[in-house]
């Protein structure tokens, strides 16, 4: 179970897609063969922060595992979420 807290500023939860990426980690610390799970909006803290949650199934392969979250823009007029080049990854 993973919880991500975001500062959306003027954006609404419907303006973004928050994704949990889970997979094996290679020798460089990069995720490989990642499974992507959409995170659901849960709570607003009232100070511009919003929490998103997701539960991923345990990875069934041996090795070093890792995860991260990413935020993509969402709008029905976008042909795909990569169109704008706006992607934000979780920070350590």
Image (tube, rainbow, N blue to C red):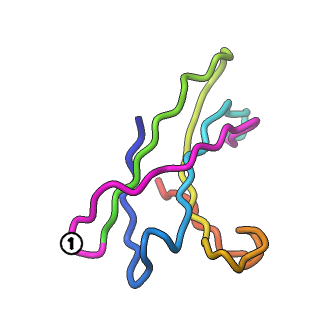
Instruction: Tell me: residue 92, above or below residue 8.
Output: above
Q: What is the chief secondary structure element of the magenta stretch? A: strand
Q: Residue furthest left?
A: 46
Instruction: Tell me: residue 79, above or below residue 1.
Output: below
- What range is drawn magenta here? 30-48
Point 52% across, 32% down: residue: 56
Q: Nearer the viewer, residue 9 or 16?
A: 16
Q: Is residue 89 left or right of residue 45?
A: right
Q: Is residue 46 left or right of residue 77?
A: left
Locate the N terminus and report the quarter of the image it occupies. Answer: top left
Q: Quadrant of residue 49?
A: bottom left
Report which residue position mark 1 lands on: 46
- Give the total number of marks visible in the rendering: 1
Instruction: Tell me: residue 4, above or below residue 58.
Output: below
Q: Residue furthest front?
A: 76
The image position of residue 58, as x and y in percent, is: 55, 22
In magenta stretch: residue 39: yes
Point 69% across, 42% down: residue: 30
Q: Nearer the viewer, residue 1 or 12?
A: 12
Point 45% across, 42% down: residue: 54
């Amino acid at each position: 179970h993973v919880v991500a807290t975001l500062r959306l500023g003027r954006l609404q939860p419907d303006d973004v897609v928050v994704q949990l990426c889970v997979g094996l980690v290679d020798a460089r610390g990069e995720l490989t063969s990642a499974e992507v799970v959409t995170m659901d909006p849960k709570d607003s803290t009232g100070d511009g922060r919003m929490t998103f949650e997701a539960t991923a199934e345990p990875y069934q392969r041996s090795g070093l595992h890792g995860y991260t979250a990413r935020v993509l823009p969402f709008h029905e007029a976008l042909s795909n979420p990569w169109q704008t080049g706006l992607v934000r990854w979780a920070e350590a």
